[in-house]
């Protein structure tokens, strides 16, 4: 069983920064994508950023110049550095792992990010 444990959410003022972490444990193949999605109240879940096990990254347009994603394969951990946060970034942020070899998709429990003065 694969578990994803997120940390780092919270309340931050506009213009501030947060760093989210997600640690994966369990039986995970070496070929996978790890990423972050978010869901604001009344909206659909959307991709924020994703990184392959080889290090290739994809950051969605709303966050492209402000957020960055990285990972530590030895720790099966993915990070989301969020800078210049805006109120519209307020959402529950979910960690995702797509195990390509097994064809399985896993989700974390979500962590709340609130950007407000």
Image: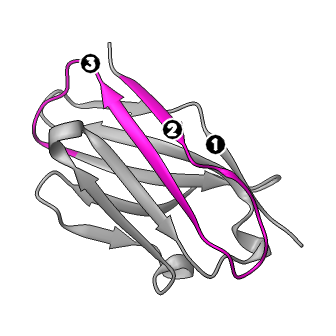
Q: Which mark is residue 111?
A: 1
- The answer for how far apart the CA atoms under marks 2 and 1 are is 7 Å
Q: Position of residue 59 (x, y in %)?
A: 40, 72
Q: Nearer the viewer, residue 103 or 32?
A: 32
Label 1 SS: strand
Q: Is residue 113 left or right of residue 52?
A: right
Residue under label 3:
26
User: Taking 19 as reference, is 28 left or right?
Assistant: left
Q: Please say if the residues under marks 3 and 2 sit with CB atoms less than 8 Å apart.
A: no
Q: Is residue 101 above or below residue 32?
A: above
Q: Residue at x 30, y 24 (%)?
A: 25
- Residue ID for mark 2: 6
Find residue 91 and name its label. none
Mark 1 is surrounded, within 10 Å at the Cα level, by few (under 14), some (14 to 19) or many (20 or more) other residues, namely many
Specify few, some or many for label 3: CA neighbours under 10 Å numbering under 14, 14-19, or 20 or more: few
* SS label for mark 2: strand
Reply yes or no: does residue 27 show up in magenta. yes
Disc 2, disc 1: CB below 8 Å? yes
Toward the viewer: 43 or 21? 21
Residues rendered magenta in the picture = 3-32
Above or below — where is 16 with respect to 3?
Answer: below
Q: Residue at x 42, y 41 (%)?
A: 22
Quadrant of the snapshot with the N terminus:
top left
Residue drawn at point x = 30 percent, y = 61 percent: 70
Marks 1/3: CA distance? Answer: 21 Å
Q: Sort mark 2 into few (<14), some (14-19) or many (20+) by Cα contacts within 10 Å.
A: many
Q: Is residue 57 above or below residue 112?
A: below
**Residue 65: image x %, image y %?**
47, 87
Q: Is residue 116 left or right of residue 32?
A: right
Q: Which label's residue is closer to the chain start, 3 or 2? A: 2
């Amino acid at each position: 069983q694969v578990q994803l444990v997120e940390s780092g959410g919270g309340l931050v003022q506009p213009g501030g920064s947060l760093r989210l972490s997600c640690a994966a444990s369990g039986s995970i193949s070496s070929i996978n994508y790890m990423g972050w999605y978010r869901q604001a109240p009344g909206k659909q879940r959307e991709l924020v950023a994703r990184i392959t096990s080889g290090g290739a990254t994809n950051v969605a347009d709303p966050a492209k110049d402000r957020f960055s994603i990285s990972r530590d394969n030895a720790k099966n951990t993915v990070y989301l550095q969020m800078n210049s946060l805006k109120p519209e970034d307020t959402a529950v942020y979910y960690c995702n792992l797509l195990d390509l070899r097994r064809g399985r998709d896993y989700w974390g429990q979500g962590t709340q990010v609130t950007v407000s003065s």
